[in-house]
Amino acid sequence: MSTTAEVRRLTTPQDLFQAAAEEFIRAANDAVAQRKRFAVALSGGSTPRSLYTLLAANASPSLPWDRMFFFFGDERHVPPDHPESNYRMANEALFSKTPIPAANIFRVAGENPDASAAAGEYEKNIRDFFSAPAGEFPRFDLILLGLGPDGHTASLFPETQALQEKSRLVAANWVEKFKTSRITFTLPLLNAAHRLSFLVSGTDKAPALHEVLEGKAPGEEYPAKLVQPGAGQLIWFVDRAAASELSAAA
């Protein structure tokens, strides 16, 4: 585990969503105060959906929506209206319910039949937004991440090729168990962020969380272990069920 990591244990999933929402609001306001804008990468899944719903319902007056820019840490290789699309989920839970300008939302073109081309296009969009030349890794203000029961995060799955990527920002990662490619941020891009927040809820995540934070298995088997920001802040928001296998010291 990164020496900069902090583990925040919350009792219930709702407590987790509330704590993560407060951190999101703090990160947004800090970034706008310091850099005049807030660039955030969202994650998919059921846990972040609850966070987005909470933000849309309660945070509108406290967030500078016109200075917030939304990206996606990973996306399925599907069109934006597909039930599995991370963009569709975020649009239903957050974008459509808040005054976010459409121009501030950067989605992955998952409908492109060529996943590698979609990844390359998204990398160009990110570099253009940050004015980042080749060889430089832009610093997102906040990246939201989840944890799979197999230890994956974003679409960096165990033993997959994208774990070895050192120069690209975005990769098309073939995931054999799903027989499909996923478009995902790479580890160097994740680790360049100012802040990263993992949201982990449920007993099905407890073994993986224990292994990532306290186990000895290599990062190639539990890719979330490889999220270790050099200069950024890393916070794990975990509920009691997810933390059930952690030691008291974690």
Image (tube, rainbow, N blue to C red):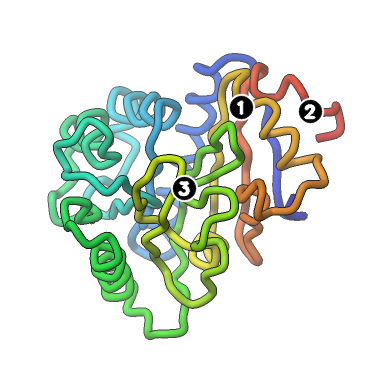
Report the residue marked by disc 3: 154
Q: In whole angstroms, how far apart are the C-alphas of marks 2 and 1? A: 11 Å
List x then y, in percent, for residue 163.
Answer: 55, 61
Number of residues whose C-alpha sits closer than 10 Å to that of mark 3, classed few (under 14), some (14–19) or many (20 or more): many
Report the residue marked by disc 2: 246
Using the rendered view, name the quadrant where residue 215 is placed.
Answer: top right
Is residue 140 positioned above or below 217 on the image? below
Q: In whole angstroms, how far apart are the C-alphas of marks 2 and 3? A: 22 Å
Q: Residue at x 27, y 65 (%)?
A: 122
Q: Residue at x 27, y 60 (%)?
A: 115
Q: Residue at x 32, y 79 (%)?
A: 131
Q: For the C terminus, which image quadrant?
A: top right
Q: Are marks 2 and 1 in contact (CB under 8 Å)?
A: no
List x then y, in percent, for residue 148.
Answer: 54, 35
Seen from the viewer's position, the closer of residues 151 and 185 is 151
Can the viewer see residue 13?
A: yes
Q: Say which label, 2 or 1, has the lower sequence index.
A: 1
Numbered label attached to residue 205: 1
Number of residues whose C-alpha sits closer than 10 Å to that of mark 2, classed few (under 14), some (14–19) or many (20 or more): some
List x then y, in percent, for residue 213.
Answer: 75, 41
